[in-house]
Amino acid sequence: MSFSKWIGASIGWSFGGPIGAIIGLALGGIVDAMAKGGSPLLGERQTGRRQTTYRTRPRQRPQTQPGDFEVSLLVLASIVIKADDHQDQRELDFVRQQFTSMYGKERANHAFKLFKNISKQSISTRQVCNQIRQMMDHPSRLQLLHFLFGIAKADTHVTENEIRQIYTISGYLGISSKDFESIKAMFFNSTENAYKILEIDKSASVDEIKKAYRKMAKKYHPDRLIHLGKEHQKGAEEKFRQVQEAYEQLQKERGF
């Protein structure tokens, strides 16, 4: 599959707005069609249907396509990696490995080429996140957050700058503080992690723990990301597994 066909295959709303501008600039040195003075990809996207941008709030949020999620992930990952003022090779390797495991080697190589060009740009976190918030469903945004923490943890140490940057991103994405703390707790070792993952206090009763488990199991169920394709099921299953483990831990501690 050529780079042009890959990037154009499943991108919808992310081809407009600030993310579209970032993609366009990143593609400048990559896409062979652009280098030849014309772009079939751009022509395809500009004809036949009206282009949705982040400024256009549709009556019904369009379903996030795999390409929209993928590009959003690349843009946000570039922001997090630069949060501590340098790009650690382990973090870059993590991004490449994750894309390889999700998409296969060829598609991952295409994505990483785009990622390196995106990383060179100065990006407005607020503008990018506003576009994602308006156009992407909540379960997909939670999955983005989970991936970003994985990147930050790839070099074994999550810095305060990285945490602050991811927290800022989550706020712009419309993710609640409880959801942020829940996903964050999946990447840290603490005696209170099980409670944080289930979004409850240590004083919660057994009935409240059971209720919280049912709520979080529903929120993080892999089926809620089925529209992104099987390549994203692994990350979704990881969140779901940690909810189950948190519940089982409290069962043992509380004896119910």
Image (cartoon, grey):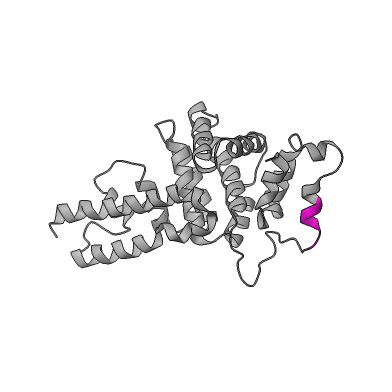
Please report the bounds of the magenta region as a residue range: 43-48
Please provide percent x and percent y for residue 64: 58, 59
Most foreground residue, 225 or 74: 225
In the picture, which quadrant includes the C terminus? Answer: bottom left
**Residue 140, placed above or below residue 4:** below
Residue at point 54% right, 39% down?
104
In the picture, which quadrant includes the N terminus? Answer: top right
**Residue 158, placed above or below residue 224:** above
Most foreground residue, 46 or 183: 46
Residue at point 78% right, 54% down?
44
Q: Main secondary structure of the magenta part?
A: helix
Please provide percent x and percent y for residue 94: 49, 34
Please provide percent x and percent y for residue 203: 21, 60
Q: Is residue 189 magenta?
A: no
Please provide percent x and percent y for residue 219: 40, 61
Q: How many marks?
A: 0
Check the image and name the residue furthest to the right: 37
Q: Horizontal placement of 97 versus 6: left or right?
A: left
